[in-house]
Structures are given as structure tokens and as C-alpha cells.
Image (spheres, rainbow, N blue to C red):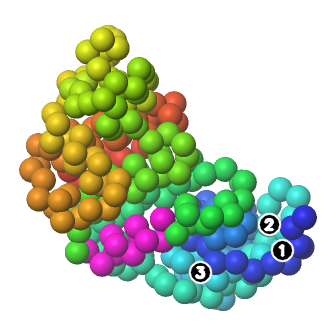
Amino acid sequence: MMQKLYRDDAIVLRTHPLGEADRIITLLTRRHGKVRAVAKGVRRTGSRFGARLEPFTLVDVQLHAGRNLHTVNQVVTIEGFAGSISSEYGRFTAATAMLETTDRLTDDVVDPSQRGFLLLVGAMRTVAEGRIPPSLVLDSFLLRTLALAGWAPELRVCATCGADGPHHAFDVSAGGLVCSACRRPGAVAVRQAAIEHMIFLMAGDWENVLDSEQTTRDQASRLIADTITWHLERAVRSLGYVER
């Protein structure tokens, strides 16, 4: 049973106004899953911690547990990614798509492994550093997030019958690659280079990821976005603004 007053590391996923001076903050915490909390008075000019409760910010937050909404009592910034991320359109849109996907895919169940939290923090840090194109960081993050949710696309054997590859068709509804015998209407032709690129993205093999051609990256990005859309049953709106 959750204690009434508790402290945790968290990353801010989104915020929206509540009344004249408050905000509802959606947080992905390290040890308590996704929580929604009221931050009272943060929209006032003299707020003690309003600027700390913005998206792309990693914070140490003290919360008071409520029945539906928790209440923010204290906030300390651990690492602020917002300045670097907001300085470039490509970084901003990619990071926004990560936050939206996390919010949509993550429920309120506690993740003992903390892998989702650590994955998001690592992706935010990588985008903020700017060493790797943000669209590639996003695609790697989306594939790994799908894997954590149990929806990783099958990239080595037929998703329907298990026949060894290589295969040259991708069926989102079937769960990944399909052989010629299992191919159904709606499956799309896919280049082997795009499949290998997705495998490298899943593994975080940046040397091979960065060696890929733009046409390969584009096809892989479309397949990843289609897979996310299929499982969420509607599009991640911010993906439409990502620079490819």
C-alpha cells in the first residue's frame, strides 16, 4: 500500500491548467509508475517550483498520495533537458513524440525493473546532447518501448508461422515480417536493409545505425510509426511533426 507522503525521481510527461493558478502534472516516476498530481499555485509569478515542473525535466519530487490525484509538495531539479531540446525543432518534436508515446503506452502499474523510466531518461539525455540525429534516437526509443510493452515487431522469422528469414514483406497486424505463404493483403514490401536497420536500432548499435542510407531510415521510420499506431489504435499526433 502506497504511503501518504512519498518521494521519487520522475520525468515530467505533460501538464495542463487547472483553475486559475494550478496545474495537473503527469509524471513517470522511477518506482511508482505513472502518476497524475496537482501542483498548486505554479502558474503564479512567484511560484516556488513552477519552472521545475515542465516537460523534459528530470526531478526529485515529494508527493502526497490522494484518491485520484496526488499533490506536489516539493520539487528539486535533477537534470533539465528542456533548454537543449527546445533549441532545435528536430530535437523538440522527437522528444515530444517520446513523451506522448510514453504517456499513451504506460499505465499506472508499477514497473519493478524501472526499465521504462530509465529508457526515457536515457533517450532524453541523448537527444539533448545532440550527437545522434534526433529522429534516429526516436525510432530506437519507439522500438524499445514496444518491446517493453510486449509488442516488439518480429524482425528475423515469419511472425505467423515462424519460418526462418529473410522475408520481404511486413504486416503490422500480424506482428512483423511475414513469409510469402503467410502474406495477406495489407502487407507491404520491405527492403532487407530497412529490417537490418531496425535490428540495429533495437540493439542500440549506433555505428551501424549511422551508416544507413536515408531511404533505409525513411522506410524503417514508417514501419515503426505504423506499428505504434496499430497498437495504440490511433496515431501519436506529435509523430506527424518529426523531421525525417
Q: Earlier in the sequence, mark 1 or mark 3?
A: 3
* Residue 107 shows in the view: yes
Q: Which residues are magenta?
A: 119-130
Q: Position of residue 127 (x, y in %)?
A: 33, 70
**Could you tell me which residue is drawn at 64 percent across and 78 percent down?**
9
Q: Residues within 10 Å of mark 1 (few under 14, many from 20)?
A: some
Left or right: where does residue 24 sit relative to residue 215? right
Q: Decide which of 46, 82 is in the foreground and name it.
A: 82
Q: Decide which of 165, 239 is in the foreground and name it.
A: 165
> Which of the 4 image quadrants contains residue 90?
bottom left
Q: Are marks 1 and 2 in contact (CB under 8 Å)?
A: yes
Query: Does the magenta-highlighted stretch encompass residue 121?
Result: yes
**Mark 3 → mark 2, Cα distance in angstroms:** 16 Å
**Mark 1 → mark 2, Cα distance in angstroms:** 6 Å
**Amino acid on which the number 3 mark rests in the picture:** Val
Q: Find residue 59 and name its label.
A: 3
Q: Position of residue 87 (x, y in %)?
A: 29, 74
Please tell me whether mark 1 sits on a helix, a strand or a loop: strand
Q: Height in image: 150 above or below 134?
A: above
Left or right: where does residue 81 sit relative to residue 74? left
Q: Position of residue 204 (x, y in %)?
A: 32, 62
Left or right: where does residue 151 sit relative to residue 140? right
Residue under label 1, please give it. Answer: 64
